[in-house]
Amino acid sequence: MPTVACDKEELFKRLGRVYSAEEFDHLLFEFGLELDEDTTAEVEEAKKKGLPAERPQLKIEIPANRYDLLCIEGIARAIRCFLGLDKPPQYKLAYPPGGEADLITATVSKETQQIRPFFACAVLRNVKFTERSYESFIDLQDKLHQNLCRRRQFVAIGTHDLDTIQAPFRYEARPPKDIKFVPLAKTQEYTADELMTVYESEKHLARYLPIIRDSPVYPIIYDQQDRVLSMPPIINSEHSKITLNTRNVFIDITATDETKLGIVANIISTMFSEYCAEPYTIEPCRVVYPDGSVRITPDLKYRTSSAHASYVNSCAGLTLNSSEVAKLLERMTLSASVSPNDPDEIIVQIPPTRPDILHERDIMEDAAIAYGFNNLPDTFPTTSTVAQPLAINKLSDIIRTECAFDGWVEALPLILCSHEENFDWLNRKDDGKTAVRIANPKTLEFQVVRTSLLQGLLKTIRENRSHPLPIRVFETSDVVFKDPSLERQARNVRHAAAVWCNKTAGFEVVHGLLDRLMHMLEIPRISSTDKKATTGYYIKERDDPTFFPGRAATIYYRLPKEYSGLLALKRTLKAAFDSPDDLEIGVLGILHPSVLEKFEISYPCSALEFNLEPFKKELQTVFA
């Protein structure tokens, strides 16, 4: 969760009163925020010692989806509405005297499609910056860059003194050798290639260089006089930098994601529109795309949604009427009124600053916050119920208990792993249809959702090599597979796995563990050639690159006939053709030396992994 540092005196001035630490902490808690730190004591201590100190700061933790609270302006605005001191502000577009024809125009060239295809811009007229509001403006850009914009990868913001540049503007993409300008805080011109070298040593900007460095063209924004405004997402021009004397601010936004582009354009313009001569007004711009389409940005249209008092009451345990719910929503910066057609329905106007409102349940949550979570009534359920575990969880507990009784130690690795660990290190190939990939992994260690438990257990052994042998670890948890037939496009499957590490391979140890677990589940062991057996499990030799050749086996399970008449008929027919319909549920064997080498394990290991889902009675008919 992002943390926003607010000047304490300035924030209390905006709220109209001075709060004690306990009062302000309670206020934030009621609103759904958290006071992370109050630096007043540190500042006073520094002053006593004669050391230089900044003004006291209040560091407030903000929910990751509330982009409108990433600056002191947004926090103060929202809390004043929450306290009933203000009505929700009405954001609007202020067109020039000549109307749409006089709008500032920005033309997007087709070459930008190769790197950052989306563009938006806006103008804040007659802004009056103070030193603190100027710093807040810069800090909001940085907060958006680091959170929603994913370190400028998705969206990059540039701000310019409009009085130093001349419209119309051009957003182009050119080869780096053809780009030359004086970057921010520099005094000499550099080509884009030279800037890549210059900024390698500057920690603040070096992290953004890989975004465009390997591209054949770099994005660049020019004005009518061919003066550079910025080279997103790296640096702005020194010529158009904003200062405390800036009165008209031009904001440019480039992006690879159109949805995030719109959110950022709305947030950055609405948050600081309060400093305009006419508060909460933004002058739009015309953006002309290569295909000839024209868009007016930012789009400050209010979204109309609806909620129902009965739904709010059912979720929060309240008995409010529609008018009372509407008043609560007003405190959360949402304009609301009772529908003239349905007394239970509330028409909600969602401002452009609240992209987090996606569903009626989000509106219900805001109403509950305004009412006060601590004020919600405590009631007993109307019916008396007794909790019962899910069948798969009960089954997992049985497996855990038996493994523990047998002397195995449970491991709890992360469910995310690298692509190499999930496939290459286990000598398995990725067919592109098995593993769920993370779209924007934080690190290389969290690229895919695991499809096996083995890699986690092997990493556990690797990190505990100093422990005396034998090492025997197990895990009973979920793996995830792609499944286009489901709405969420993926399914969880509960697996059980165990790995034995010793000076000898110990195939008989994991085989014995399998037999023990099956015995406790009352699954008999049968022969693969026994066609008369109605249920049971057996193993057959298999070739698997994860395991040593000739030292691996597939675990088969014959489902009981009584769980599905269709299954019984199908099995009878297949048995007649000497092709029994038994389910492959897992594998066991001695791990291949190359697998152990990749996990840096110097002792032989035997492993067992099988699917627990077929043993749930509720799911057995699925396999018919």
Image: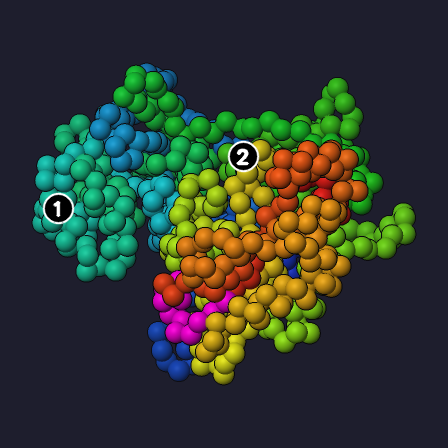
Picture quarter containing residue 290? top left
Q: Secondary structure at mark 1?
A: helix
Q: Residue at x 20, y 49 (%)?
A: 184
Q: Which residues are magenta?
A: 595-606
Q: Quadrant of the C terminus?
A: top right
- Which mark sits nearer the N-terminus, 2 or 1? 1
Residue to which mark 2 is pinned: 484
- The Cα–Cα distance between marks 2 and 1, rounded to whole angstroms, is 45 Å
Q: Residue at x 11, y 44 (%)?
A: 191
Q: Secondary structure at mark 2?
A: loop
Relative to 594, is 488 above or below? Answer: above
Instruction: Say left or right for 97 vs 93.
Output: left
Q: Position of residue 551 (x, y in %)?
A: 47, 62
Picture quarter containing residue 174? top left
Number of other residues with Cα within 10 Å of mark 1, as a class: few under 14, some 14 to 19, many 20 or more: some
Q: Position of residue 368 (x, y in %)?
A: 71, 46
Residue to which mark 1 is pinned: 193
Name which residue type carries label 1: Asp
Report if residue 596 lies within the magenta region. Answer: yes
* Residue 281 in sight: yes
Q: Residue at x 56, y 54 (%)?
A: 540
